[in-house]
């Protein structure tokens, strides 16, 4: 088919360039960019509090909480663009 497969040591990545029609993909990207509750957490490194060098957002089912580097991630409810 029209897929690109990348073999990685610990994962398989599948890329489907036409998974969404172009107009739908553009619309979803815009909606997600505008409606996602991005945040920039801080992490303690070598005794100093520093910004993590990326924005993150955690959405999921209730109770899908996890902790990474002492940062608790409590899921926000799914949004319509994410469910789509």
Image: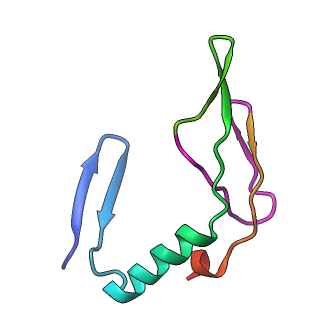
Q: Farthest residue toward the left?
A: 1
Residue 8 drawn above or below residue 79: above
Q: Is residue 59 magenta?
A: yes
Q: Farthest residue toward the top?
A: 46
Q: Residue at (74%, 58%) from the top-left corner?
A: 75
Quadrant position of residue 23: bottom left
Q: Residue at (37%, 83%) from the top-left corner?
A: 20
Which of the pair 36/84 is nearer the observer? 36
Residue 84 drawn above or below residue 39: below
According to the image, what is the colour scheme of the structure?
Answer: rainbow
Name the dominant secondary structure of the magenta segment: loop
Which of the pair 49/81 is nearer the observer? 49
- Which quadrant of the rendered structure holds the N terminus? bottom left
- Which quadrant of the rendered structure holds the C terminus? bottom right
Please indicate whether residue 69 sits to the left or right of residue 24 in the image.
Answer: right
Residue 44 drawn above or below residue 68: above
Q: What is the span of residues highlighted in magenta in the rendered image?
A: 54-70
Q: Position of residue 70 (x, y in %)?
A: 73, 31
Q: Residue at (28%, 81%) from the top-left corner?
A: 18
Which of the pair 25/17 is nearer the observer? 25
Which of the pair 29/78 is nearer the observer? 29
Quadrant position of residue 44: top right
Residue 81 drawn above or below residue 51: below
Please indicate whether residue 11 sits to the left or right of residue 76 in the image.
Answer: left
Q: Position of residue 21 (x, y in %)?
A: 33, 88
């Amino acid at each position: 088919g029209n897929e690109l497969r990348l073999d990685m040591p610990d994962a398989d990545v599948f890329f489907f360039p036409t998974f969404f029609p172009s107009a739908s993909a553009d619309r979803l990207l815009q909606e997600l960019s505008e409606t996602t509750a991005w945040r920039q957490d801080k992490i303690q490194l070598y005794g100093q509090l520093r910004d993590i060098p990326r924005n993150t957002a955690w959405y999921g089912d209730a109770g899908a909480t996890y902790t990474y580097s002492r940062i608790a991630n409590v899921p926000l409810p799914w949004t319509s663009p994410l469910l789509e």
